[in-house]
Image (cartoon, grey):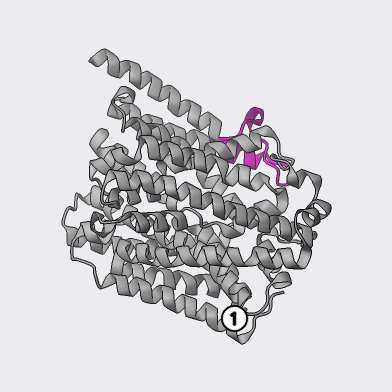
């Protein structure tokens, strides 16, 4: 159980008001065209690019707390290292190429490189990939803890607050709100570590009070479990938020430098969150719900005001990602699915359908969040099923030496998705006591990637024979 002083509650209420104010304030600068509504006029400078990318890409704070509480520094190995690696790959090999296309969305690139049906299928997969259900759930859980509302009411209220300024200002409102949230998330986690050190001590306290495996890189997990999270980190290469921010950067150099700088910020934030997770495990060894590890650590260590600011840091971390994914999800519905199926090109209609998409995405995310078993499970299921479909056709579209015919790209995408999803369902249905029994013990992402790669290989042979 958590307790808040009046000033803590007022600080948190003020934070919500400030985010909405910043979002609506940014909307005043909006111009009445699609490029401005969807990409802020492609004018992102380096500081704004870094602030929005860092905050957007690090939203799963309760999931990180859950994982670090269970597995210790393996959290850094699973949710840190592979993402730095693939962000570096994106920066070095894709950022400038993405910006040079002057497209708006990933399906734009798929249609230009392949055909309309591949773009529509890519749009559907993109919608599921960016569905912000995990962040809707996390934000609802935190607000429930803070204000004592029901989970349903908390989710409904916070989702409404998130989409109201996006509906008005589009991507520009999202970016400015992200910049404010970037400051608050770092401030919040920078506060808790000195207080935890002062109350409990340093590394010696952690060593004495956490399981030995928590201080080992694997955290007691087998190599295949660790490896699948590295493959899930391939998400970075197909992540619509990365692509959108590169499209919106003022030039390719800004996009490339911005990602490199962002990696340094993620490293620092991971250090703070992993250390806080170890303190939570050491100080609170018997939590029934590890997702509450950060809030309950704050309850043990922080005085009034500091506690309010720490909760604001957690809220900011989640809300920055939630708003960005909600907007991309709405773009996918409005521009990429409805726009392509109806051949709508009128900017006003695209903007209108994107706004309708915000409502549809919000309702879908709320429903999924209420049905979800856990935050980490949502990430695992979405990453496992969707990445094998999108990854190879999208990456191949940026490099002439990897090109394949449109029909092969479509089947590589479709089969990569279907095989992974079928393998996941097969293992879950055959599971015992909640432990899935996958075919030959193989994680379901691997068969999907393998099939997609085989289809790409055949397509590559056909493509070369046609030259």
The reply to whether residue 129 is in sight is: no
Which one is nearer the viewer's eye here, 104 or 8?
8
Q: What number of labels is visible?
A: 1
Q: Is residue 451 left or right of residue 247?
A: right
403 or 183, nearer to the observer: 183
Residue position marked by numbered label 1 in the rendering: 8
Name the outermost residue toward the right.
Answer: 208
Please tell me whether residue 443 belongs to the stretch shown in magenta: yes
Q: Quadrant of residue 440?
A: top right
- Give the quarter of the figure containing the N terminus: bottom right
The residue closer to the viewer here, 224 or 39, is 39
**Residue at the image point whose x is 47% and y is 65% from the top:** 183
Q: Is residue 457 above or below residue 444?
A: above
Residue 315 included in the magenta stretch of the image: no
Residue 430 visible from this viewpoint: yes
* Residue drawn where x is 50% and y is 58% of the image: 133
- Residue 393: where, in percent of width, then height? 36, 32
Whole-percent x, y for residue 449 in the image:
49, 30
User: Quick check: 17 left or right of 346?
Assistant: right
Residue 189, horizontal then vertical, whole percent? 59, 63
Q: Residue furthest top?
A: 465
Q: Quadrant of residue 169?
A: bottom left
The magenta stretch is 422-444
For residue 374, above or below residue 309: above
Q: Residue at x 54, y 83 (%)?
A: 10
């Amino acid at each position: 159980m958590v307790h808040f002083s009046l000033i803590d509650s007022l600080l948190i209420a003020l934070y919500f008001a400030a985010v909405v104010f910043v979002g609506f304030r940014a909307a005043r600068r909006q111009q009445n065209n699609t490029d401005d509504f969807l990409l802020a006029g492609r004018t992102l400078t380096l500081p704004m690019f870094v602030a929005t990318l860092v905050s957007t890409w690090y939203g799963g704070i309760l999931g990180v707390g859950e994982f670090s509480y269970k597995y210790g520094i393996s959290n850094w190995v699973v949710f840190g290292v592979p993402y730095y690696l693939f962000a570096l790959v994106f920066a070095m090999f894709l950022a400038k190429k993405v910006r040079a296309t002057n497209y708006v969305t990933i399906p734009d690139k798929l249609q230009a490189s392949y055909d309309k049906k591949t773009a529509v299928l890519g749009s559907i997969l993109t919608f599921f990939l960016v569905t912000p259900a995990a962040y809707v759930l996390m934000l609802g859980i935190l607000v429930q803890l803070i204000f004592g509302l029901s989970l349903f009411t908390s989710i409904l209220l916070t989702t409404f607050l998130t989409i109201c300024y996006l509906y008005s200002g589009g991507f520009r409102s999202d970016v400015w709100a992200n910049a404010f949230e970037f400051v608050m998330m770092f401030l919040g986690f920078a506060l808790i570590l000195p207080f935890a050190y002062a109350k409990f001590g340093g590394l010696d306290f952690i060593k004495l009070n956490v399981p030995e495996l928590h201080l080992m890189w694997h955290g007691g997990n087998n190599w295949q479990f660790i490896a699948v999270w590295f493959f899930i980190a391939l998400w970075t290469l197909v992540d619509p938020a990365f692509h959108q921010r590169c499209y919106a950067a003022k030039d390719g150099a800004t996009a490339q430098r911005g990602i490199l700088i962002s990696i340094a910020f993620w490293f620092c934030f991971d250090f703070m969150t992993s250390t806080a997770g170890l303190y939570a495990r050491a100080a609170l060894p018997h939590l029934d719900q590890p997702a509450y590890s950060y809030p309950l650590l704050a309850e043990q260590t922080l005085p009034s005001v500091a506690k309010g600011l720490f909760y604001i840091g957690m809220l900011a971390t989640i809300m920055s990602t939630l708003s960005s994914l909600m907007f991309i999800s709405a773009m996918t519905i409005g521009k990429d699915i409805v726009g392509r199926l109806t051949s709508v090109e009128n900017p006003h209609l695209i903007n209108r359908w994107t706004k309708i998409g915000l409502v549809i995405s919000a309702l879908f995310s709320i429903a999924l969040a209420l049905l979800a078993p856990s935050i980490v499970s949502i990430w695992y299921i979405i990453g496992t099923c969707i990445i094998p479909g999108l990854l190879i056709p999208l990456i191949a579209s940026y490099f002439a030496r990897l090109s394949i015919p449109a029909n092969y790209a479509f089947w590589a995408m479709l089969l990569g998705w279907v095989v992974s999803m079928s393998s996941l369902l097969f293992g879950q249905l055959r599971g015992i006591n909640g432990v899935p029994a996958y075919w030959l013990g193989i994680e379901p992402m691997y068969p999907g990637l393998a099939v997609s790669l085989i289809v790409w290989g055949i397509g590559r042979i056909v493509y070369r024979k046609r030259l």
